[in-house]
Image (tube, rainbow, N blue to C red):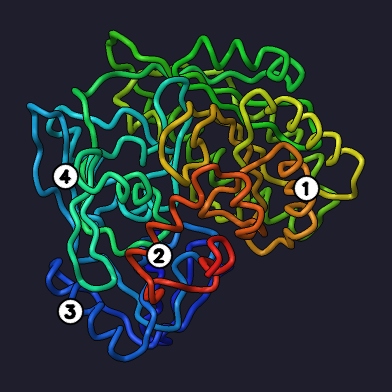
Amino acid sequence: MTDTYARTTNTWRNWAGNVTARPARVESPASVDELAEVLRRASEDGLKVKPVGTGHSFTAAAATDGVLIRPDLLTGIRGIDREAMTVTVEAGTPLKRLNAALAREGLSLTNMGDIMEQTVAGATSTGTHGTGRDSASISAQIRALELVTADGTVLSCSADEHPDVFAAARIGLGALGVVTAVTFAIEPVFLLTAREEPMTFDRVTADFDQLVTENEHFEFYWFPHTGNCNTKRNNRSAGPAAPPGRVSGWIEDELLSNGIFQVACSVGRAVPAAIPSLARISSRALSARTYTDIPYKVFTSPRRVRFVEMEYAVPREAAVDALRELKAMVERSPLRISFPVEVRTAPADDIALSTASGRESAYIAVHLYRGTPYQAYFTAVERIMTGYDGRPHWGKIHTRDAGYLSGSYPRFGEFTAVRDRLDPDRLFANDYLRRVLGD
C-alpha cells in the first residue's frame, strides 16, 4: 500500500484514487489523551473530524475538509489474554502486522478477509469480511472496543458494558467516535487446506448450496463473458503444513494473478473489444491446486492491480437468482467487463449495521480496473441487487441513502439513536454519512 496522504499537496487520496479530500489539518495523536485534545480543539474551531486508515474504502467514508486523524502512532498489541483467549490491539495497527504477531504467539483470528492491508479500526468500522459457513466478519469477532466520543469521553464497550454502544460501534462507520482499541476473540493457530479448482458457472450455481454447506469457507470468481469460474474451498486440516511451492506460488499469485492480469486489464482498458477474448484466456490460466498453511496465509493474498468495487449482500437464498440475472445482464449489454465477479457468504450476526445483520448472506462483488468508467456497470448491478433487498458494503461504491437503508436494516433506528446521543452536534459528520445515515 502507498501512503494515502500526499503531504506536499495537503491532499488525501484513497487507495483506488477515486476519492480525494483536502483537510484543513492532519493530526497523528500518540495516545488517547492526545486524541481527546485533538477533538476538543477541532470542536472549538468549528471543524469536523474524520479518522482514516489505509484508504482502502472506495467510498468517501473518511473524507473531510476539517481535521483528518491518522492512526500511525496508535499501533501495537496492548495485551493477550490466554485465559479469555482475546487480544487487545491499538486501532491503527495494520491487519497484516496483527496476523503476523498472533502467528508468532501460536494464535490466530478465526476468519478474515482476502486482503490484510487495512488498519484494525478501518476494517471493522466498514464491515470487512471474508467468507464462512459458520464464522462471520472481522467485526463479529470483536469482544470489546474503546471509543473516544465527541466530548472526549473514553468509553469501554462490550456485551456487558455499554451494550447498546457495543451493538452499534462494532461497525460504526466513523459516526459514533474514534475507535482507539479493539479486543478480538482468538484461538490457537490452526491449519487450513485450500482447494482451488476451475468449475463452470452452471455447475457452481447448481451446486451452490451444497458447496457452501459442505465447506467451512467457500468462495468463487466468475469471469464475465465466459461460463468459467474459479472456486476456492478452505477447510481445517490436521496437517502437515504444505504451503505452495516457492516457484509455483509465485507463478499463481504474482505472475498470473497480478503481473499478467495487470497487463490484461491495461490492454482491455485501451481496447475494450479485446476483453471477452482476454477473459476466456484468463479464466483458463489458473489451474487446480491444493495447499495447507496457517490461516492468514490461506485467507489473504496480494492485490496489486488497482480497481474500484461495488459489493452487495443479498439473502443467501437469493444468491443464485441474483447471479444468473447479473450474468444475463452482462451478456445482453454492450458492457465489457475485465474483472471477475467475486461471491462469498456469511452467517447471520447481531451487529446493528452489519450487512449480515439478522440474516444469512451472500456477497456479490463487482470490480473494474482503476480508470475505467464504471457508472453504467455498477448502476445496472445495483438495480439487480436492490431488487433482492441487497445491502451495500459500507466501504464500497453505491448510491443508496438513508431512506433505502432504514428499510433494509431492522436496527437502523437503534444505530441512529446511539449516534444522536454520542454525537448530537455531528462532529464526525461528512457528506457520506449525511447520505447514508441522514442528519
- The answer to whether the residue labelled 2 contacts the one labelled 4, judged by CB atoms less than 8 Å apart, is no
Residue 151 shown left or right of residue 362 in the figure: left
Instruction: Name the image quarter holding residue 191.
Output: top left
Camera-side residue of 42 and 302: 42
Q: CA distance from mark 3 to mark 4?
A: 23 Å
* Residue underneath mark 1: 383
User: Which dot marks residue 88?
Assistant: 4
* Residue underneath mark 3: 37
Residue 115 shown left or right of residue 269 in the figure: left
Q: CA distance from mark 3 to mark 2?
A: 22 Å
Of badges 2 and 4, the one in the foreground is 2
Q: CA distance from mark 1 to mark 2?
A: 31 Å
Instruction: Pick out the residue farthest to the bottom.
Output: 45
Please name the residue shown 44% across and 76% down the image: 12
* Residue underneath mark 2: 420
Q: Amino acid at mark 1?
A: Arg
Camera-side residue of 320 and 279: 320
- Note whether residue 261 is visible: no
Instruction: Name the image quarter holding residue 206.
Output: top right
